[in-house]
Image (tube, rainbow, N blue to C red):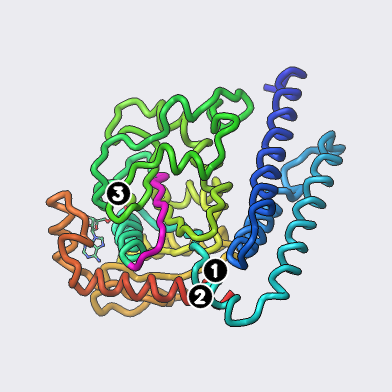
Amino acid sequence: MPLTDAQIAARQAWVLDTLERRMSIVEGLVGNARLPLDWLGAQRQARSFLGYAGPSTRPSPDPLAAAFGDHVAALQAVEMQATEELSTVDPEALADARSRLGLRLALVGKGGAGKTVLSSTLARILARRGRKVFAADLDTCPGLAFSLGVPVTDAGLPDEALEEAPAAPYGWQLAAGLTPDEAVERFGAVGPEGIRFLGLGKIGAVDKDQARRSVAAVRQILQGFSAADTDVVADLEAGPTTPFENYHDFSTDVVVVVGPAWRSAMTARRLLPMVGDRRMTIVANRFRDEPDHPSLVPAIRVPNDPDLTQAEREGRSPFEACPDSPAVQAIGHLADLLLAQLASG
Ligand SMILES: Nc1ncnc2c1ncn2[C@@H]1O[C@H](COP(=O)(O)OP(=O)(O)O)[C@@H](O)[C@H]1O
Ligand SMILES: [Mg+2]
């Protein structure tokens, strides 16, 4: 069905509003930037928003072309300013700032590959090391809260955090005036060691209405979450569908989790192209001693570990139930690797 003129107008207004929200996030970062870490955050956020401003899906002739042109120019100016500021910082101070920059991490892979166990354990390990962590569950069959040890069952966004927006996916979005950082601060459930947690809504809810209503808002939060010093760890819904909808688009690092099964490797291979030019880290999970899947050589092998399965059966966080188990140790090495890669720029 072709769109009516009113629908087209609403959609254009929504796109312009989205661009304005993005600019105000970046302007806020620049306005408050004092330290090298602030400039690293502003630079990264401007680059990330530039990634959404490409002409890929817009019609031609494009009535929003001028607005996009201005938007891109403004983001490029911020990126240049940040780069200039950072060029005056001495190497030691810059390296120190880089080591405190938060991860923007998405975990993908076939259902059952171990995304939730890896996400939750990574989040707990990072938090235990004194880092600030925001963990997000984008699976409509959520499990991350339990696995983190967050004592909540319905850590979705409340109605006051949402507003109707007919042109947004599923007709809802983040409420006007609420920045992504504020949304996490105000509505994220607080877990162990101060981990902030947000999911799509009630665990086990029969009707997925709440999840649908919050999906655009949670994505806006991930895309615009700009606290430079906070690690973001997102557990994406199983299989290739979600990443192809670009739910990982906020990330700079993608962890592809591969189980020993042939089908798990097949799914992982399908996911590789969508990772694009993001940094990719392949993890073999439930590893015994089988040979690597062709073209999926893992950077980290997390052993198959009965303690983990047992923890899960008891509804406990693996990080608490078996902190010294080989699997949790291996996930600690994954944390080391991700942070080292991030710090190296
Ligand atoms: N390394 C491992 N050793 C043993 N069991 C594991 C391991 N990783 C995950 N599991 C178990 O496999 C199942 C699926 O893991 P999960 O993290 O929920 O996968 P996903 O989120 O990718 O669907 C869970 O029961 C979990 O406890
Ligand atoms: Mg899961």
Task: Report x, y in % for residue 311.
Answer: 15, 57
Residue situated in front as seen by the camera: 118 or 127: 127
Viewed as shown, does residue 12 lie left or right of 330? Answer: right
What residue range appears in magenta? Answer: 129-138
Viewer-nearest residue: 260 or 339: 339
Q: Residue at x 39, y 46 (%)?
A: 137
The disc, 3 or 2, on the residue closer to the chain's N-terminal end is: 3
* Residue 66 locus on image (x, y percent): 86, 40
- Position of residue 211 relative to residue 26, above or below, is above
Q: Is residue 131 magenta?
A: yes
Return the residue nearer the eye: 260 or 326. Answer: 326
**Which image quarter holds the N terminus?**
top right
198 sits to left or right of 84: left
Cα separation, mark 3 vs mark 2, equals 27 Å
Q: Are marks 1 and 2 in contact (CB under 8 Å)?
A: yes
Looking at mark 3, is its residue's CB closer than 8 Å to ligand 2? no
Q: Which residue is mark 3?
A: 191
Q: Which residue is mark 1?
A: 279
